Amino acid sequence: MTESTRVALVLPIPKLVGSFAACVAVVAEERRYLGLVHGRSEGETREFIESVWSDGGQVMLAIDGDLVVGWCSTIPQTSEGFTHLAHIGMGILPEYRGQGLGRRLIDNALGWAWNAEYERLELSVFTDNEVAVHLYRSVGFVEEGVRRRARKLDGQYKDITFMAIFRPDLEQNPPSA
């Protein structure tokens, strides 16, 4: 049995909050994939989950037993004029990458968002994260722009690519202005 086949996708429950915080910390401390470079406390993680839920979003965890090995959050925008869209964020522990888990998480997020009647999903990804950019393109995200030298960390600049996808029924018949 591969690691990927043992992994289940679940909504956060209280006993997983600490493991979720630890998972985010591992990915953040790689200083490569997330805007965060340090993890959040268990309390801050709990507040994050509650905030996403209170705004009508979703946090999906990938777990192997009781170990959170990845996540995908779909965070609705709440400002007037922007409530038709949500922002996707995700991460996976290094030893679980390259096994299709990212695809499972993003497919789940897309299905959830379209069922929740969001019309547009957005994300940002460091341009040099070619594996993630390829994944997002493979499910239909398109590049909308690049913010050059968006982050300077440890003396190194990184560009950020902005990507978006429209709900499939709107892509065929875009709303008129």
Image (cartoon, helix red, strand yellow):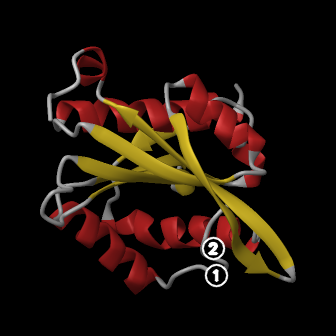
Q: CA distance from mark 1 to mark 2?
A: 6 Å
x%, y% of residue 104?
51, 31
Quadrant where the image shows the N terminus: top right
Percent position of residue 54, x then y: 16, 66
| Closer mark to the observer between disc 1 and disc 2 | 1
Q: Give above or below for 155 relative to 52.
A: below
Quick one: quadrant of the C terminus? top left
124 shown above or below 99: below
Whether residue 61 appears in this view of the structure is no
Checking the image for residue 89, the label placed there is: none
Q: Residue at x 50, y 46 (%)?
A: 62
**Quadrant of the image occupied by residue 150:** bottom right
Label 1 with label 2: CB-CB less than 8 Å: yes
Nearest the eye: 11 or 149 = 149
Q: Which residue is mark 2?
A: 25
Callout 1 secondary element: loop
Report x, y in % for residue 13: 32, 60
Q: Give residue 147's quadrant in the image.
A: bottom right
What amino acid is labelled 2 in the image?
Ala
Q: Nearer the viewer, residue 44 or 84?
A: 84
Q: Which mark is residue 38?
A: 1
| Relative side of 43 to 35, left or right | left
Q: Amino acid at mark 1?
A: His
